[in-house]
Amino acid sequence: MRQADPMRIGLIGAGNIGTTLATILVRAGHEVAISNSRGPASLQAFADTLGTSAQAVSVEEAAGFGDLAIESIPFRAIPSLPGDALRGRILVSASNCIPRRDGEIDLEGLTHTEYVARQLPATRVVKCFNTITWQHLGEQGDTSAPLQRRRVIPIAADDEEAAQRVAALVASLGFGPLYTGSLAQSWLQQPGFYNRNLALWEAVTELEVAGRR
Ligand SMILES: NC(=O)c1ccc[n+]([C@@H]2O[C@H](COP(=O)([O-])OP(=O)(O)OC[C@H]3O[C@@H](n4cnc5c(N)ncnc54)[C@H](OP(=O)(O)O)[C@@H]3O)[C@@H](O)[C@H]2O)c1
């Protein structure tokens, strides 16, 4: 896997996952622009805690910032993502559809992230960071550990080049990236795979045993 050069990353969503991602991304040497629904003024104090590699911006600015954007917003807010600013860009989708929180959304038989991709047909959507709790995301990355022994973070995408870039990013944070297939196959990243503290080698073994690779 190729090493990730320092990247510039736009974050849409600044809750548990968004602020944790901002923190570990900056720690790993990346630059972030972070946004939420209430506007940059509400995030300035948080951005200041991360130093000069972080800035608070609008959602549109985060969507168009640097190398790729990551959304971690409630699933019901997915239709509000700025399609024009995301056109042609890589969007990592960390959100999950949770009916008790998001209400009933008719996914028409699609996986959660196929649904996101359908809302944004001109965007290179990659599913990642949706199976790990924000606490584990903040604590378990270990760049000194061999790749196979690191906590696995699965990745699904229809665009292989986009998936590779995200895999390099995941590795730069000290996790073990595992490409599990297309967005249609990303049911592996839906409830069932959630919150399981597997090393990369264990996840690969499980998938092989299940005949899914
Ligand atoms: N919590 C976890 O451990 C975890 C793990 C994996 C995946 N996820 C998924 O990640 C997503 C976020 O979870 P979370 O726990 O981080 O949620 P959260 O703490 O409630 O944060 C949600 C963030 O989204 C922002 N937001 C809401 N509507 C928005 C919009 N239309 N445009 C831009 N930003 C908007 C909120 O901004 P305001 O506060 O300004 O409204 C807030 O910053 C969910 O889909 C969840 O299923 C969560």
Image (cartoon, rainbow, N blue to C red):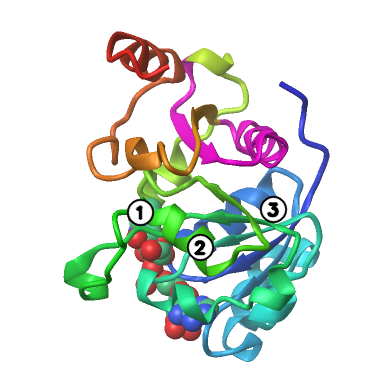
Picture disc at residue 95: none
On whether residue 44 falls in the magenta region, the answer is no
Q: Nearer the viewer, residue 76 or 62?
A: 76
Q: State which region is magenta.
A: 149-174
In the image, farthest residue toward the left:
100
Q: Residue at x 59, y 74 (%)?
A: 46
Question: Does any portion of residue 3 appear in the rendered image?
Answer: yes
In this rendering, position of residue 132 left or right of residue 81? left
Residue 139 percent across, percent down from the top left? 45, 41
Q: Amino acid at mark 1?
A: Leu
Could you say whether the residue bearing mark 3 is in a helix, strand or loop?
A: helix
In this rendering, position of residue 134 left or right of residue 174? left
Q: Is residue 59 above or below residue 69?
A: below
Q: Which comes sooner in the sequence, label 1 or label 3?
A: 3
Residue 25 percent across, percent down from the top left? 65, 50
Q: Which residue is mark 1?
A: 110
Q: Amino acid at mark 3?
A: Val
Q: Which residue is mark 3?
A: 26
Quarter holding residue 49: bottom right
Quarter holding residue 115: bottom left
Q: Residue at x 43, y 16 (%)?
A: 213
Count of number-bearing discs = 3
Mark 2 to mark 3 CA distance (whole Å): 31 Å
Q: Which residue is mark 2?
A: 118
